[in-house]
Amino acid sequence: MKRAALGFRMHSGWGVLVSVAGDTGQEEVIDRRRIAITDPAKPGANQPYHHAATLEFPAAERHLANCQGASERLALAAIKQVVQELEARHYGIAGAAVLLASGRPLPSLAKILASHPLIHTAEGEFFRNSIRNACEQLQIPVEAIRERELEKRVKAAFGNAASRLQRRIATAGRSIGSPWTSDHKAAALAALLVLWPASERD
């Protein structure tokens, strides 16, 4: 089987999943899609911490636990579908990358719910963790990459080839069509970092 890797950039309740493959110097995007990992019928699912902040504390904990279970199930189903489709095309998944924001540890739930900025931070982590947990359930090695470090890591990993690679990813929409947004480009670059670790790039 040919090697492939997955890259994720998440938002509140949804995100983009980009799959890449190819030998070094011949990398290509082989799949990209939007994935939804919340139940639209569940109140507060897209912004679980915002909704939890309107509830009494025990109810807030239950709401978050229920949302977490639902999001992980939906993430698992979405990723499993992609893996099965790629396997049918003779691609094996070498790993996955999830883009992070700050990556700073969060305080207790009570402190999060008392702070609007922390509520936003916690929601970002909530959906990224759903993806990470789903990948782990599927036994896909997953790496968290801070978005602000992505360009530096690409340059460090690919050296003189980094600029060429970034241009190829930036203009990939010309061949694969729209949408090809900053979300897709960042997810693709993150996936390439796990497709061929530095030890295998020579």
Image (spheres, helix red, strand yellow):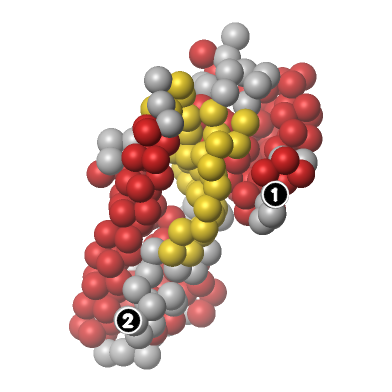
| Relative depth, front residue between 49 and 47 | 47
In the displayed structure image, the side of residue 180 where residue 97 appears, left or right? left
- Disc 1 marks a residue whose amino acid type is Gly
Q: Residue furthest top?
A: 202
Please give the name of the residue rendered at 37% of the width and 32% of the height, measured from the top-left corner: 87
Which residue is at a point 43% across and 64% down the rendered structure image?
36
For the point 70% across and 49% down, the residue is 177
Q: Is 65 drawn above or below residue 83 in the view shown?
A: below
- Spatial CA distance of label 2 from label 1 is 33 Å
Q: Which part of the image, by quadrant, shows the C terminus?
A: top right
Q: Say whether residue 137 is left or right of residue 192.
A: left
Crowding around mark 1 (Cα neighbors within 10 Å: few <14, some 14 to 19, many 20+) is: few
Residue at mark 2 = 42
Q: Would you identify the image quadrant in which residue 107 lies?
A: bottom left
Question: Is 88 above or below relative to 181?
Answer: above
Mark 1 lies on residue:
177
Mark 2: secondary structure: loop
Residue under the image location 43 percent in, 75 percent down: 46
Of residues 90 and 7, the one drawn nearer to the viewer in this rendering: 90
Q: Residue 40 in the image: x percent, y percent?
A: 38, 78
Residue 71 % position (x, y)? 33, 64
Give above or below for 128 relative to 84.
below
Work out which quarter of the rendered image holds the N terminus and state it: top left
Tell which of 1 and 115 is nearer to you. 1
In the rendered structure, the answer to whether residue 42 lies left or right of residue 118 reads left
